[in-house]
Amino acid sequence: MSGALRALAAAVLVAAGLAGCSSPRPSATRPAESATGTRLTATLTSPVDITLRWTGTEPGAAGRIVEFATEPGGPYTILDYLPLGRTSYRHPELMPETPFYYRVRPYYGPASRPVDVRLPKGEFTEKDQKDDHEWAPPRTLRQTAVRTGSVTPGAAGAAAPTGLRATVMHANGIRFTWTDHASDEQGYLLEDRPRGGDRFRPVAVLDPDINSFGLITLENEKRATYRVRAFRYGERSNVVHLKTGASPQR
């Protein structure tokens, strides 16, 4: 299934996509860089290609995000969610003669137990496109007498989502529901690991308090393992700034 068809989900969802999604709400105060935080550098590898590299440790983090802006004060846009083992990122084919500002920061938080999903055979059909997919938009379902906890690193883990359930809605659609136990999350990440994959990756970014969401899958996600993570962002790295050069001759 093409990325254009997957965008059907985005058309009916409040959730942001990964590449190019809006930056989360800024913290009330900007924390100082810590001794164990991320230190970022940037290099123009061509007039319109920028490569980022970073060093540093982020104990307890689930991964890092890379953000960019074209103004010193933002707004910043998330480029990608990366595993902790990654120490570089390439931002290619940029607008010529334009300033770019970058920062990197970790995200933290506990994940639910995973669930395996096997969708039936079938392409995303014209009938599916006409479906209003009223089950898909992110929602907050009512919960009662639920114990909550903090997603802050070092907390006891009471904030981990529980009861993750995947309901097959059609050959390319899954509705996920779970119990929200987080008291201070900045959002939820729906993560998947396609069959044969070596790691989980975020496929949707959701607002705080959401506990129901429908995903329109890609072809390689018809057999996959899914989980949901309550998360908060950590300290920002230093900001690096480069200006791209003239457009290369074609």
Image (spheres, helix red, strand yellow):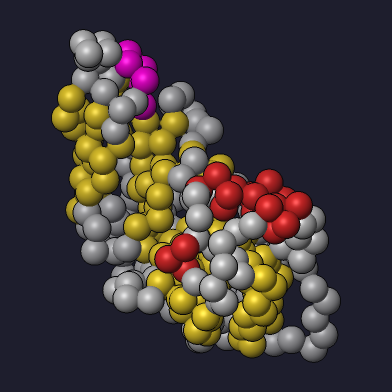
Spot occupied by residue 36 in the image (x, y as percentages of width and height): 26, 60
**Residue 122 visible in the picture:** yes
Location of residue 159 with respect to 73 vertically, above or below: below
Say if 95 sits above or below 19 in the image. Answer: above
Q: How many marks?
A: 0
The quarter of the displayed image where residue 230 is located: bottom right
Q: Residue at x 37, y 31 (%)?
A: 101
Q: Which quarter of the image is occupied by the C terminus?
A: top left
Q: Position of residue 114 (x, y in %)?
A: 49, 83
What segment carries the magenta color?
95-100
- Residue at 26% x, 11% y: name it: 246
From the top left corner, tell me how far across and down residue 42 is, in percent: 22, 35
Front-most of residues 67 and 15: 15
> In this view of the protein, which residue sits in the foreground, 128 or 109?
128
What's the magenta bit mostly, secondary-structure-wise?
loop
x and y percent of residue 41 in the render? 22, 39
Whether the magenta-drawn stretch holds residue 161 is answered as no
**241 on left or right of 133:** left
- Tell me if 246 is positioned left or right of 79 in this view: left
- Relative to residue 19, is residue 63 depicted above or below? below
Q: Is residue 209 visible?
A: no
Residue 56 as seen in the image, left or right of residue 200: left
